[in-house]
Image: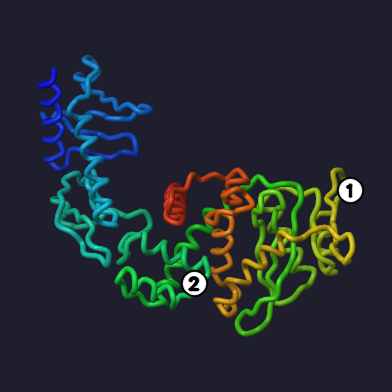
Amino acid sequence: MESQAESRELGGLAILAMGNQIKRLDSSTYRVRSQSGNGAYLVFRDRSEWKCECPDHVYRAVECKHIYAVKFSLTLRERVALENIGFEELCIPETCKFCGSTNIIKRGYRKKGNGKVQRFACKDCGRRFVVNENGFHKMKYNPELVTLTLDLYFKGISLRKIVDHLRQFYGFKVHYSTVLRWIQKYIELMRSYVDELTPRVGETWQGDEMKVKCGGKWGWLWNLMDADTRFLLAMQLSRSREVDDARNVFAEAKAKAKKKPKAVITDGLPAYVKAFKKEFFTLKNPRSKHIRNVGFKDKTNNNLIERLHGTVRERDKVLRGLKTENTPILDGYNIYYNFIRPHMSLNGKTPAEVASIDLNLDENRWLSFIRKALEKRNDKC
């Protein structure tokens, strides 16, 4: 029995050594080609156990050479990931991205700022290509480095200090304008994904506005937050504090939550009164109640939104004001606050997780979020 097990292990190593026999379908399913060249077998994980469709595993209930090949392949992938931060593809894609041919071979590597990426060639059309790296195709730098810049930026580090950090600790020379383009590109991608998510928020919302500088002139940043989950429902920038400005914030929050709250807490700004009536007033029950925080005594606590403004103010000081009204920074900060940044008051969870939007993000939340957003966009295409 021991010699048969060793024989199957050697068979698994032989399959792996051929280089193009294992195709990854998803994280727990693989297709392994038969050594005889007649068809392929499906290897999949059932809970903690690996199973295969080949007769050796089905009728003898043993770990066949195809299962060993997949295990060896996974071990090899883990070692490569530790030795080289990158997204090199170990398995040959089934078809050519240009002509659809299945006659694909490995053809060297493409050099990048982070090392190298496996390049493939089609024997039929002669074209060479690399596999799309989940939103980072043709990027000079690896995804971890790009998402590191996003995380540093929304934690309050300036663009030039981020560039200096990359040069000192990673040896990469990146221009600050490149970092800004990365932020603009991926925030736009994530924003389209976030717009389709509906949080399960509470019945009390808190709103307030803060004065910020935009394009060298003063403006107003409006925020509306759910008191229970700390989920930021709306964040808008305007030049004035009129009724229409306040109403736009209410409308955005209502559309995001897909419901009306029982109570909205604001300060004593007169624009809130008319905006609330236009957006929430109804003759039917239950009615939304507007609680105005106008006095110094016995006023309803609005500290949650004030705490948010303190966090935003820390970031605004680094920016030294916003450059344009349509800046992607606000959308990015909304994503960072709701989905990326854990809150101590929420026991280390993000507002999105408390609001029943659990995306099961990996340790690198930015990278995992970008991948999910890209998958969603590709599904629509």
Label 2: how many Cα within 10 Å (few below 14, some 14–19, many 20+): some
In the image, what residue occupies the spot 74% across and 61% down?
303
In the image, what residue occupies the spot 61% across and 75% down?
325
Residue 124 at x, y percent in the picture: 14, 50
Q: Residue 157 — which label?
A: 2
315 or 117, which lies in front? 315
Location of residue 244 by image quarter: bottom right
Q: Amino acid at mark 1?
A: Leu
Q: Can residue 13 be seen in this snapshot?
A: yes
For residue 211, above or below residue 108: below
> Mark 1 and 2 residues: CB-CB less than 8 Å, in contact?
no
In the image, what residue occupies the spot 57% across and 50% down?
348
Describe the element under mark 1 as helix, strand or loop: loop
Describe the element under mark 2 as helix, strand or loop: loop
166 or 237, which lies in front? 166
Q: Residue 61 — which label?
A: none
Q: Provide the residue designation for mark 1.
A: 283
304 or 292, which lies in front? 304
Q: How many marks?
A: 2
Residue 295 at x, y percent in the picture: 89, 66
- Front disc: 1 or 2: 2
Q: Amino acid at mark 2?
A: Ile
What distance separates the C-alpha of mark 1 from that of mark 2? 49 Å
* Image quarter of the N terminus: top left
40 or 334, which lies in front? 334
Residue 14 at x, y percent in the picture: 11, 35
Residue 208 at x, y percent in the picture: 74, 65
Q: Can residue 184 be seen in this snapshot?
A: no
147 relative position to 15: left or right = right
221 relative position to 116: left or right = right
Q: Mark 1 or 2 closer to N-term?
A: 2
